[in-house]
Amino acid sequence: MNIAIASGKGGTGKTTVATNLAFYLQHHAKEDVALLDCDVEEPNCHLFLKSVCLETKKVILPVPSLDPDKCTGCGKCSEICQFAAIACIKGKVLTFPELCHGCGGCILACPAGALSEQEREIGTVETGTSGKIKTVYGQLRVGEAMSPPLIRAVKSHAQNGQINIIDSPPGTSCPVIQAVKGCDFVLLVTEPTPFGLNDLSLAVEMVRVLGLPFAVGINRSTIGDEKVREYCRNEKIPIILEIPEDREIASMYSRGRLVLESLPHYMEKFEKLYLQLKEVIPC
Ligand code: SF4
Ligand code: SF4
């Protein structure tokens, strides 16, 4: 069972929801839980869960390497590449490894055997535990743009028979699609502000295109206006979580602590969320 926690923009409380939901599910609902942090440019779920790292693995992408002595300059490699990661200009081949998705198409297409695989490290996947919660997160190398293969590597740790919470990157671009794709349910976290509404509507479009069941959670629900609720009513989108604006939550967050560890009265909210999730996705 894979539940993605996503948001159209950063800073909406997505990680707060993901980490506290994982904590609630394991400590109170006694479910087997894994938290897969796919926000690989800025992973921080493990910090809130105080997870202990057990293993670090490099994630390698195979990119083409050219043997100029064998190249005939036919251009077939550049014709097949959908990502403009290899070009053939006036018979000379140029490779752009930072754009390469490692599909291997150009290597297969080269009739002269002039291309071979070369390894390029894009980041690491760290696996660990926080009590009985399994934690996995990806750490993209600084300056690296190719996050989808790393997100795939993190998601490969999702196992059947447990609830896999996937903390998605913010936004609606390729990395987010990679994180939410194939999930059983997506919880879109937003704030009741004009920016929140704008980014929520983009995220809703994305999950609808992907055909994923979803609902909305409103963080800092006591600020802003009613437009997000109005939008959800008109679009018939259920709101299954509301967390009010609370200085104590902000204070816990700034100290890297979970809300449920220090503010137990919020337990009820996560219990309600759990029961609603159980209704829409049989756990
Ligand atoms: S491996 Fe795939 S993505 Fe990379 S250069 Fe070759 S065709 Fe393009
Ligand atoms: S397909 Fe092979 S031979 Fe043709 S230009 Fe590309 S690398 Fe050179």
Image: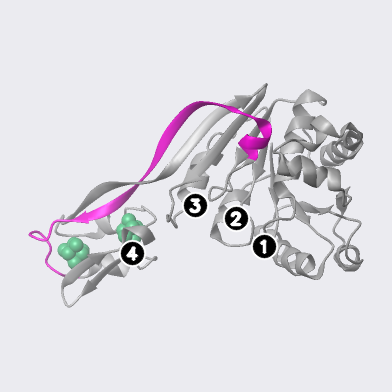
Residue 148 numbered tag: 3
**How far apart in space, not on screen, are marks 3 and 4 (Cα)?**
16 Å
Give how far across and how far down residue 180 sits, in percent.
63, 50
Give how far across and how far down residue 24 sits, in percent.
79, 31
Check contact, mark 2 vs mark 1: CB within 8 A.
yes
Residue wearing tag 4: 85
In this picture the colour scheme is: one colour
Packing grade of label 2 (10 A; few <14, some 14-19, many >=20) is: many
Question: Is residue 67 rendered magenta in the image?
Answer: yes
Three-letter code for the amino acid on which mark 3 is drawn: Pro
User: Mark 4 or mark 2, which is nearer the start of the sequence?
Assistant: 4
Residue in the picture at 27% in, 70% down: 87
Residue 206 numbered tag: 1
Q: Which range is magenta?
A: 45-74
Three-letter code for the amino acid on which mark 4 is drawn: Ala
User: Mark 1 or mark 4, which is nearer the start of the sequence?
Assistant: 4
Q: Is disc 3 placed on a helix, strand or loop?
A: helix
Packing grade of label 3 (10 A; few <14, some 14-19, many >=20) is: some
Check contact, mark 2 vs mark 4: CB within 8 A.
no
Give how far across and how far down residue 226 sits, in percent.
92, 66
- Using residue 223 as the reference point, say whether residue 19 is left or right of it: left
Rendered view: 39 above or below 114: above
**How far apart in space, not on screen, are marks 2 and 3 (Cα)?**
9 Å
Residue in the picture at 57% in, 34% down: 136
Marks 2, 1: nearer the viewer: 2
Packing grade of label 1 (10 A; few <14, some 14-19, many >=20) is: some
